[in-house]
């Protein structure tokens, strides 16, 4: 992966952050953070031995 491709991916996050700041949508920040955290949790536990323990939480 080239450096420019990696920077393009981060530019999307930067644009989204600027959008939230300009539109005063601070209330969306915790919602997005929780959704990202849950997505990371699902991807991380997909093939690990921890998966049965995580699934009992939900």
Image: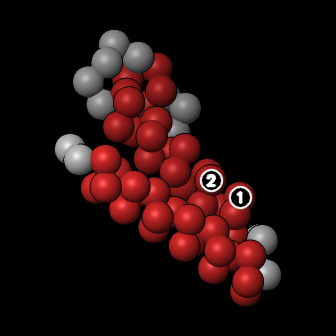
In space, the residues marked 1 and 2 are separated at their CA atoms by 5 Å
Residue 4 makes an appearance in the image: yes
* Front one among 28 and 17: 17
Horizontal relation, residue 48 to residue 37: left or right: left
- Reading the image, the residue beneath label 1 is 30
Furthest residue in direction bottom, as rendered: 23
Residue at position x 39%, y 39% from top?
42
**Quarter of the view holding residue 5:** bottom left
- Give the residue number, with chain letter if any, for mark 2: 33
Q: How many marks?
A: 2
Quadrant where the N terminus lies? top left
- Name the residue located 38 percent from the left edge and 30 percent from the top edge: 44
Q: SS at mark 1?
A: helix
Residue 12 coordinates in the image, percent (x, y): 45, 67
Residue 21 in the image: above or below residue 43: below
Looking at the image, do the residues carrying marks 1 and 2 touch, with CB atoms under 8 Å apart?
A: yes
Q: In the picture shown, does residue 39 fall above or below 4?
A: above
Secondary element under disc 2, as helix, strand or loop, is: helix
């Amino acid at each position: 992966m080239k450096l420019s491709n990696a920077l393009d991916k981060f530019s999307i996050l930067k644009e989204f952050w600027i959008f939230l700041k300009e539109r005063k949508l601070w209330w969306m920040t915790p919602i997005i953070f929780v959704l990202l955290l849950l997505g990371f949790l699902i991807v991380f536990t997909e093939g690990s031995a921890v998966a049965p323990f995580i699934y009992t939480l939900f």
